[in-house]
Image (spheres, rainbow, N blue to C red):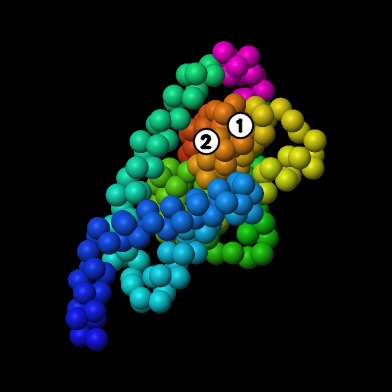
Amino acid sequence: MTDPARLWVFLAASPLFWLTATLAAYAVADWLSQRADRNPLVNPVLIAVLLLAALLTLTRTPYETYFEGAQFVHFLLGPATVALAVPLHRNWATVRKALAPIFAALLAGAATAVVSAVGIAWAFGAPFDVLASLAPKSVTAAIAMGISQEIGGNPALTATLVISTGVLGAIMVTPLMNAMGLTDYRARGFAVGVASHGIGTARAFQVDPVAGTFAGIALGLNGLLTALIAPVIIGWIR
């Protein structure tokens, strides 16, 4: 028992181990999603999160130790967001025809995402730091955590809320849009991009490339607009 225990202590302290564990968890989750024919309920992000949470709990590994390895994946959030310009360029002719509806939907969606979340939490008596952490929950994590820190929120709580929002949006978007009879993939993609940032955008690309393109546009524009309106709304509450 001594040698395996020593080996585990060595592996657990290695950033490479936790990076590998993160990639392996997502690979398993994505395989399960493929086996389920990309059913929205079998969301690879949610499954990967549950697998890693179980591993960290069983091994009693602090988050700080885990993040020493996972930070390399976190770093890739920035380049991945910038890479969304590629499908935008490829579908620019389609996007250009819908500029007016895009900006109208962006303004309505961004305002609703912030006001509804903060308003409901405020009505239930949530403390100010929770309200500030909730405000950017529909923005991709790389932007949301920065907004949260600037307006007095807790970036770690914001990251959790961002992931929860993204997973719920990715699960709900397809059945919800089908139930509403919405068949325009531009509208479907833009809606999930505004509401559920990168995780929703990944789901949109699985469904249709046009939906993914418009989701990517919404992701970027919503991050910019939320960075402008969230401080104003939180300032009023303060």
Q: Which residue is identified by label 1?
A: 208
Decide which of tag 2 and tag 1 comes sooner along the chain: 1
Which SS class for mark 2? Answer: helix
Position of 222 with respect to 104 (left or right) is left
Pick the front one: 206 or 81: 206
Q: Is residue 99 magenta?
A: yes
Horizontal and vertical percent for residue 229? 54, 39
Q: Quadrant of residue 155?
A: bottom left
Question: Residue at horizontal 60%, vertical 54%?
Answer: 42
- Which stretch did the figure color magenta? 93-103
Q: Is residue 165 above or below residue 104?
A: below
Horizontal and vertical percent for residue 39? 64, 49
Horizontal and vertical percent for residue 167? 57, 52
- Amino acid beneath label 2: Leu
Q: Quadrant of residue 64?
A: bottom left
Q: Is residue 229 magenta?
A: no
Q: Is residue 81 above or below residue 41?
A: above
Position of 105 with respect to 59 (left or right) is right
The circle on residue 219 is 2
